[in-house]
Amino acid sequence: MLTVNSIKNGIVIDHIKAGLGIKIFKMLGLDKIDSAVCLLMNVPSEKLGKKDIIKIENVVDIDLTILGILDPNITINVIKDEVIVEKKKFELPERVENVLNCKNPRCVTSIEKYIDHVFYLVDKEKGEYRCMYCDEIYTLSEV
């Protein structure tokens, strides 16, 4: 059996849909930070059957809002002296910038590479976002 020690201080990204952990790891740029990072994949879970977990030693300055788009069931546990001091749940953000890429070939973001890709939430239940420039709609299932 695989054993992974607890962390003294840092964050644990938990309840990640199985297989999504590596994508989150890359999107957050965790391969570029100086802190110790552990990616656990296909861990048994009562709720999900299987899940992925990411443990990050020390609290690092990373933007975690993207997690709400990738999987709104993800939780963040903030650990201090080996005790969970804060537990965060995510909701879909109202605005996302440079997370989704507009696939409309006529969109200005397809032509001008320096323009930020900006999307606004238009339907929370369906998980739909609209491109700020061309009004193209994307659902989270396309992410």
Image (cartoon, rainbow, N blue to C red):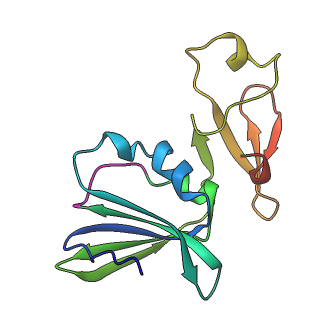
Q: Picture coordinates of residue 43 (x, y %)? A: 53, 75
Q: Picture coordinates of residue 60 (x, y %)? A: 27, 53
Q: Compared to 8, does 36 lie above or below?
A: above
| Residue extending furthest toward the front | 1
Residues drawn in magenta: 58-63
In screen coordinates, is 84 left or right of 108?
left
Q: Quadrant of residue 131?
A: top right
Q: Picture coordinates of residue 25 (x, y %)? A: 46, 50
Q: Nearer the viewer, residue 90 or 52?
A: 52
Does 59 appear in magenta? yes
Q: Picture coordinates of residue 143 (x, y %)? A: 71, 46
Q: Nearer the viewer, residue 113 or 38?
A: 38
Predominant SS along the magenta part: loop
Give the residue drawn at x 25%, y 56%: 36
Q: Quadrant of residue 12?
A: bottom left
In screen coordinates, is 23 left or right of 104?
left
Give the residue drawn at x 69%, y 44%: 120
Give the residue drawn at x 36%, y 43%: 31
Does 29 appear in magenta? no
Q: Nearer the viewer, residue 43 or 134?
A: 43
